[in-house]
Image: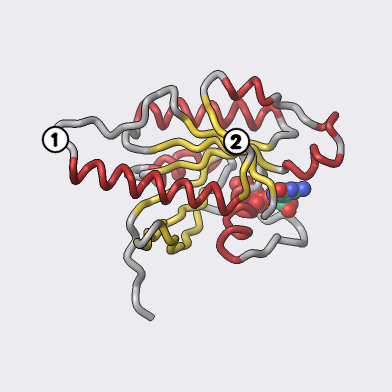
Amino acid sequence: MSAMRVDAKVVMLGKESVGKTSLVERYVHHRFLVGPYQNTIGAAFVAKPIQVGEKVITLGIWDTAGSERYEAMSRIYYRGARAAIVCYDLTDSSSFQRAKFWVKELQNCEEHCRIYLCGTKNDLIEGDRSLRQIDYHDVQDFAEGEPSSTDELFQKVAEDYNSSAFQYMTEEPGVDLGQKKDSIFYSCCHSN
Ligand SMILES: Nc1nc2c(ncn2[C@@H]2O[C@H](COP(=O)(O)OP(=O)(O)OP(=O)(O)O)[C@@H](O)[C@H]2O)c(=O)[nH]1
């Protein structure tokens, strides 16, 4: 089996059980995990080619373990990432605090990493609005965007990477390609 060339490293971050693995499974394998919840140990990797215009961009997606026990390992996995999908569970306010922790850390440590904040388990709040613990206005202070499908989220990651790589080739040397601190993209993923 030949190895696939990865264009951009993407890291999934967020509190345990927010649904990072499920999001990746849904996107890459079009399946929703059933059965008892199995927490990720360390991290899992999958490469996913995505069509962007006439090009194919291959994302190397690292799905990290959300348990705080593995926090030091997650730091290793986000190093050099061009994008981070920071997930929180819309029905769990503590997961939003944890997401803010990762956003701050990435902003301080990985200036070329674009940040995508993703609210998960939208289906639960669609079934019962009272379960919602994080209001859309709470995220508006530091992120902007629209509810989107999992496909749309990863497509945006690939397109943003592609346009920043293009900028890199055409801009003058010394131009800062880091994401502006106030331009975090927000997505509240619903099933495709
Ligand atoms: N209702 C609902 N449940 C979900 C959704 N996504 C994940 N879950 C459930 O939440 C639990 C945790 O999902 P995972 O995808 O394993 O969570 P994780 O963030 O990868 O967890 P760690 O590996 O511990 O970091 C599982 O029981 C999933 O079935 C969703 O969109 N809706």
Q: Nearer the viewer, residue 61 or 146?
A: 146
Farthest bottom residue in view: 1
**Residue in the picture at 43% in, 63% down:** 49
Give the quarter of the figure containing the N terminus.
bottom left
Distance CA(mark 2)–CA(mark 1): 32 Å
Q: Do we see residue 47 in this rendering? A: no
- Seen as rendered, the residue at the extreme front is 53
Type of residue at label 1? Glu
- Location of residue 111 in the rendering, given as x and y in whole percent from the top left corner: 32, 32
Q: Residue at x 58, y 58 (%)?
A: 27
Residue topped by disc 2: 146
The picture places residue 48, in percent across and down from the top left corner, at 46, 62
Q: What amino acid is at disc 2?
A: Glu
Look at the numbered disc 2 and give the secondary structure of its residue. Answer: loop
**N-terminal-most mark, 2 or 1:** 2
Identified at 34% across, 34% down, the residue is 110
Residue sitting at x 67%, y 28%: 94
Above or below: residue 164 compared with residue 135: below
Question: Residue 43 or 115: which is nearer the viewer?
Answer: 115
Q: Residues within 10 Å of mark 1 (few under 14, many from 20)?
A: few
Q: Is residue 123 above or below residue 179?
A: below
Q: Could one spot residue 48 in this view of the protein?
A: yes
The local crowd at label 2, few if under 14, some if 14 to 19, many if 20 or more residues have their Cα within 10 Å, is few
The residue that mark 1 highlights is 172
Left or right, 30 with reference to 72:
right
